[in-house]
Image (tube, helix red, strand yellow):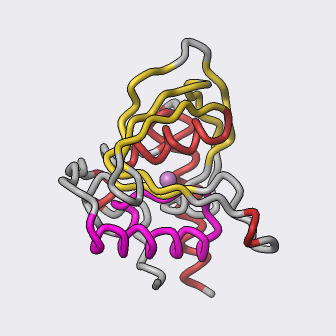
Amino acid sequence: MSVMKLYTYPDPVLRQKCQKITGVNDQTRHLLDDMLETMYADKGCGLAAPQVGVLQRIIVLDPNPSDEDLTARRPMYLVNPEIIWRSEETILFDEGCLSLPDQRAEVERFKQIRVRYINYFGDEQEMLAEGLLAIILQHEIDHLDGILYIDHLSRLKRTRLLKKLEKYYTEQEKK
Ligand code: NI
């Protein structure tokens, strides 16, 4: 497994719509493994393929990406994930994204969703998700359509966040 290059805002690769993949083979599993390694290395709880420059409908996530206790990790791999049901109830959660480093903002998401996807072994599965898992899934599936969490913010909040991000990049360059 190896850590891949992470693409950050405003890289245009983050705005592309990803293609469905036709089947899970060893090459797909290799990519899933590398994406998971990259996610843990960057201390994220979810990662979508366009964030590593791959325009395929693939995400990995772990609601508990613990560094101290590796046995507590619960990695999940989803190929061609599709939201097939959304609850009426929504929740607010303070989200971040590895492609917008050091920033966070509150986003409204559906409280529960049902997702259909293909797993690591190529089997079709369905999952009912709620809470943090549902939030991560909605955030990552958005990435596959070129949508970032800042797109869910008001124009004012988005402008403010992007200014802070620019400042962060400038400070990082100085280091
Ligand atoms: Ni993200």
Outermost right residue: 68
Query: Which residue is drawn at the image coordinates 22% and 49% (left, top)?
Result: 20
22 left or right of 38?
left
Q: Give 112 or 23, whichever is nearer the viewer.
A: 23
Query: Which residue is drawn at the image coordinates 54% and 54% (left, top)?
Result: 163
Outermost top residue: 88
- Percent position (x, y) of residue 108? 59, 28
Q: Give 79 or 155, whichever is nearer the viewer.
A: 79
Relative to 129, does residue 121 appear above or below in the rendering? below
- Percent position (x, y) of residue 109? 56, 28
Task: Count all numbered tags in the image, as a single digit.
Answer: 0
Residue 13: image quadrant is bottom left
Q: Give 90 or 167, whichever is nearer the viewer.
A: 90
Q: Main secondary structure of the magenta part?
A: helix
Residue 25: image quadrant is bottom left
Tell whether position 124 is magenta. Answer: no
Which quadrant of the rendered structure holds the C terminus? bottom right
Query: Which residue is drawn at the image coordinates 59% and 78% (left, top)?
Result: 172
- Percent position (x, y) of residue 138? 49, 38
- Percent position (x, y) of residue 156? 54, 34
Relative to 13, does residue 29 appear above or below in the rendering? below
Start-end of magenta stretch: 25-52
Query: Which residue is drawn at the image coordinates 26% and 57% (left, top)?
Result: 56
